[in-house]
Amino acid sequence: MATDTGQSNQQNTGIGEDRPLKRGPLSKWVSSSIQNPERAYRAMFYVATVFFLFTTLFPFYWLLVLALTPQNLLTNVGLVPNGFNPMSFVTVFERVPFHIYMFNSLVLGIMTTVIVLLLASLAGYVFGRLRFPGKAPMMLAILAISYFPPAAFLIPLFELFTGNVAVPLLGTSLVFGEQLYLNSPDLFNTPWAMVLPFSALFMPLSIFILTTFYGQIPDGLEDAARIEGTTRLGALFRVIIPLSAPGVATAGVLTFISVYNEFFFSFLMNNGEAQNWAPLVGGIIGLQGQFDTPYHLMAAASIIGVLPVAILVIVAQEKIVSGLTAGALKE
């Protein structure tokens, strides 16, 4: 009896041990990921890449769909164009002088980039190669400026650039018998009304990038140039900047793209006319009528306007990637 009972318990125990566990798809995936982590990393990388490409490229695809759809069919737009109307890209230049708006944006971007790179190179050399008290707090203060919203500077800058700020000149009341004032220049509808705010807004990032690069250049190279009779300024432009070409290119490209796509000051510092240096955004808004909003033309103008930046990124992508990665490493 005891023997039969023991055998029966062993059989029951064996049946319980041999019964397979029921696992769901999530449990199976977790178990497979633990056994083969590289496969899991690869799968997550592909998922993240597909998601990033979809969220990045879909707006451009949607713009293309709108641009190719005839205006009378825009009320029923799907994932594919309702028709094929490439004349929208031609009509953009017939409605407004869009080529002049693009030229204005290119000029504003180039002017701002030159100013930013020149001043940021000098500041980057000071912060990256010299030692002086208070360097870290000053660098933090410069970076903190970039976190202020542009709207915070709108009213002061608008008053300043429209000639509404008057500074009293000390002592003039004693000399001339009346108080004299120095009025701010009227820069409204001029490129400087946009270039100066752009330079101030986008310079902190360039200073940070160039400071990182200039700080990695060996001191021996600059010392050798100084021994040959070169000044610090000469060593900067003859030794430091050429050796930091990826960082300079990165700062320049990022500044140009930011200025080219800027909307806030570009919209408020001029009246939107092409002859008054209104940038790309002025041309897109100028396509609107009083009672009509041609979305297909605005989409076509957006695609045309983004082409110079897309070409610039494709040409300079190696410099941008190497600049961002090299700037993050300290050799």
Image (cartoon, rainbow, N blue to C red):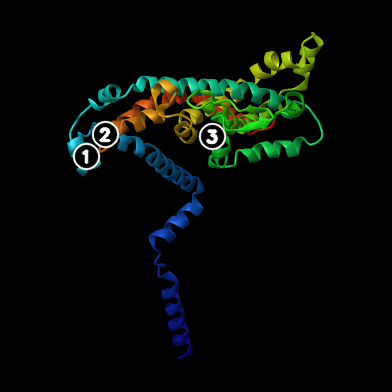
In this rendering, is residue 143 above or below 252? below
Give coordinates of residue 125: x percent, y percent. Answer: 71, 24
Q: Is residue 13 among what the camera can see?
A: yes
Are the two marked residues, 3 and 1, in contact with CB atoms closer than 8 angstroms?
Answer: no
Q: Secondary structure at mark 2?
A: helix
- Residue 280 falls in which quadrant of the image? top left
Q: Residue at x 25, y 37 (%)?
A: 292
Rendered-image quadrant of the C terminus:
top right
- What amino acid is found at the position of numbered circle 1 in the picture? Leu
- Residue 311 falls in which quadrant of the image? top left
Give coordinates of residue 122: x percent, y percent. Answer: 69, 23
**Image disc number at residue 158:** 3
Are the two marked residues, 2 and 1, in contact with CB atoms closer than 8 angstroms?
Answer: yes
In this rendering, is residue 157 above or below 36? above
Are the two marked residues, 2 and 3, in contact with CB atoms closer than 8 angstroms?
Answer: no
Would you say 153 lies left or right of 142 here? Answer: left
Q: Residue at x 73, y 36 (%)?
A: 138
- Circle 2 is placed at which residue position? 296
Give coordinates of residue 19: x percent, y percent. Answer: 40, 70
Closer to the camera in the image, 141 or 29: 141
- Circle 1 is placed at which residue position? 74
- Residue 75 falls in which quadrant of the image? top left
Disc 2 crowd rating (10 Å Cα; few below 14, some 14-19, many 20+) is many
